[in-house]
Amino acid sequence: MRLTASWIALLQLVFLELVSASAPILRPRQYDTREYYALHLSPDAIPQDVAGHLGLEFEGKIGELDHHYLFSGPKSDSDVVSEYRRRRKSKRDAGANDDVILFAEKQKVKQLEKRIPHPPILRRSAPLVRASHDPNLLQRFQEISEKLDLHDPIFHEQWHLFNTVEKGHDVNVTGLWIEGVTGHNSTVAIVDDGLDMYSDDLKDNYFAEGSWDFNDPGPEPKPRLSDDRHGTRCAGEIAAVRNNVCGVGVAYDSKVAGIRILSKQISDADEAVALNYAYQKNQIYSCSWGPPDDGRSMEAPGILIKKAILKGINEGRQGKGSIFVFASGNGAASGDNCNFDGYTNSIYSITVGAIDRKGNHPYYSEHCSAQMVVTYSSGSGDAIHTTDVGKNQCYSGHGGTSAAAPLAAGIFALVLSVRPDLSWRDLQYLSMDTAVPINTDDGMWDKTATGKLYSHRYGFGKLDAYAIVQAAKTFQPVKPQAWYKSPVIMVNHEIPQGPKGLRSEIEITKDMLKEANLARVEHIQVHMNAKHGKRGDMSVDLVSPKGIVSHIATKRDLDNSAAGYQDWDFMTVKHWGEDGEGVWSIIIRDTEVNEYTGSLTDWSITLWGESINADRAGPHPLPGEEGHQTATERPTSTAKIMTTDIPSSWAHDHAQATGNPTDHPTRPVNAKPTSTNVSGSAPTAEADEDKSGFLPSFLPTFGVSAKTQAWIYGSFVVIAAFIAAVAVYLVKQRRKQKAREDGMNYEFEALNNDDLEEGAPRVQGQAGAAAGGRRKARDLYDAFGASDDESELFSDDEDNDDHEKGYYDDEAARGLDESSKGRDGDREKLLGRQHR
């Protein structure tokens, strides 16, 4: 039977799907001469037919992403897919929608950066002096080495595995090894610049089936460039074999795969394939790279990469989810923060920071509210000792958060060797539950709503291998994930500069959470749009109903971008375990008083956590496929906004977020809670007046509302007026006495009505002489601290009206009635002011 071209194309597509299911490989790229297009097609579309219509060549399926394909054409400045869609739309009848292209993106090439600290760590030529070692620890080390038959020549230098100098400052793994927990049946994929599969220290644990080279396409991701050493060193931390070469890995019986993407430029499509590569057999993906850690960049993974990561979470490891481990970044010395990196602030990543061999925070490790844990790396005169490229090569200078992430990945491999049934979220729970707080006296820790300690510098603490594996043995897996997404809160309000912040709120009710099937919070995302002439001047805090503060964005002095925040997702794990019910607030600040100003456009909040009813839970749809709902179609709400004073502990807040400790012992908590804002409620003048400060920035607010401030300062003014009146009375008595002594028999002359200024009120009773009265009125006027410039006495802020009126009516006017009733413009200047 003769087959039509369409049937042949369909059979080709089925064959392609079957092949790609086991090995989703794309053909080598030719970025210098060709353009590449990623397309999401409708399920009934035949990609070869689409290629013919577009005049492009079909390249293949994009990894594990259903109905996503790559096409290519000659190098061109134009976007042929966009042009084709425009032409087709113009020819279509109104209302018709037969476009099989659901999404299209012309690919751009990029270079991801290894998270190596700058300046680089100097390689030591000799190990630390042994005189400082603890004799008891040395004896214990010898016993462990003999019991496990560990004779690797640099094992005694691998302090991160057993520290014989600084007691307790290691990952506490040797007890697991003695119990036989060494990483059997676990696999970690090193997504990096290659892996030397021929090294004697790695070849027995190399997992070829999970490996691929995306830079020089082929099945062997071996190092090819002179600086392709990073991945091999990371792999050695995890799975260096127990033998007579170099040292051992923390999970020395686990397998390591190599996925090479960092040595050349790649596209989002390539990266998407890499992050799902062999995702049923590669359990953990160790990623020690990301956007530049320069304190200026603000980059997130593209839509294809986001889809790939969520695909791995939903379907990897037979539905238990791929484990993505990311290094937090090395930009702390540049004021960088890992919440400005869309990889490290993803809810699907376990973000790992660094501490050094003494347990101190190294200069390079970034801080942020998305950081889960820390573990050991370079600093305090030493670094991580591991495998290097070459048949029998070792390295003693591996460091940065690049070294912390694979060490954490190796510890997670130990966990999965004991409990392979645990989900990606179970690993996050275990990390949080068993992390050990360190340096708790450095002023960088807060207590969360569940009673745990959290630090933007250390996360929940350092990983303890023995503790997390023991906890995993009896851990009850959590219910599936659920989420609540708020409406978009429309603000469109300028951000005050200096000591005040702009506050916006939303209330989330128990019924909303019940409807969303959300039992308790794990991750929180704040989606935000804000404009500013110098992005680095802005900072943002998230305040939970329990009063817990997350510094989700911090000031970055080097960030001079005028782009602001554009559809950016900040994330925090600090509210883990809260029920989510109540008023959530964001406070955005313009921290510098300069020519650069900004405004908050809108924001929304998403609470992610454990479901109430597991039967109602389902996987989150891939980004861009949520019922094809765009951001502009999401429900919106009008924000109630207010300015808020910065508590005296604000300096400590900034230290919490940036890692520079201060003498301030507490985090910022409003002394008086603000009013509740129900989603959808409109702003009210009364609320704004009550929350807005009216005082000059140098006067204290006492942590209370504006009306209470007015009452306090009004009382001060009344007291001052009384003292001034007494002073005037004493002066007057003194003058009477002097007049008597001089033989005078009167104090005032009669004031004719002709002496009154036109329009001035006429006063009943005795009046003083014009000259003397005016002088005495001026004396009284000056006694209240006034000068010839009335603006120094009277504020233009209308919030002062109430206390000014009471003060001048009750005290000042009474003094005038006694001494200068009927006086001219001076009295008008004083009394008439109350009616402005």
Image (spheres, rainbow, N blue to C red):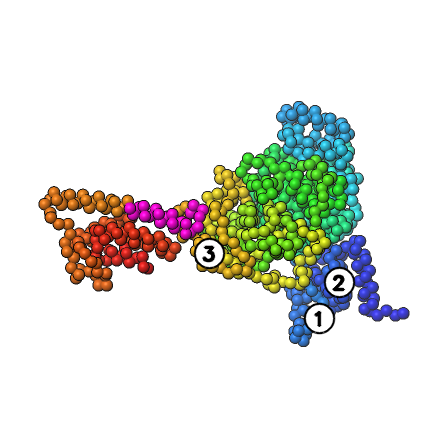
Task: Provide residue 451's location: percent of width, then percent of height.
Answer: 59, 41
Between 570 and 750, the one lying in front of the other is: 750
- Determine which residue is flagged by label 2: 58
Instruction: Identify the main secondary structure in magenta.
Output: helix
* Label 3 neighbour load within 10 Å: few <14, some 14-19, many 20+: some
Under mark 3, the amino acid is Ala
Under mark 2, the amino acid is Phe
- Determine which residue is flagged by label 1: 98
* Labels 1 & 2 near each other (Cβ < 8 A): no
Instruction: Tell me the element at label 2.
Output: strand
Is 450 rendered above or below residue 89?
above
Q: Earlier in the sequence, mark 3 or mark 1?
A: 1
Q: How far apart are marks 1 and 2 (CA)?
A: 21 Å
* Labels 3 & 1 near each other (Cβ < 8 A): no
Q: Earlier in the sequence, mark 1 or mark 2?
A: 2
Q: Is residue 312 left or right of residue 596?
A: right
* Label 2 neighbour load within 10 Å: few <14, some 14-19, many 20+: some
- Part of the protein shown in magenta: 701-722
- Determine which residue is flagged by label 3: 687
Q: Is residue 16 magenta?
A: no
Between 116 and 21, the one lying in front of the other is: 21
Could you tell me which residue is drawn at 75 percent across and 32 percent down? Answer: 178
Task: Provide residue 165's location: percent of width, then percent of height.
Answer: 64, 28
Q: Distance between the residues labelled 3 and 2?
A: 60 Å
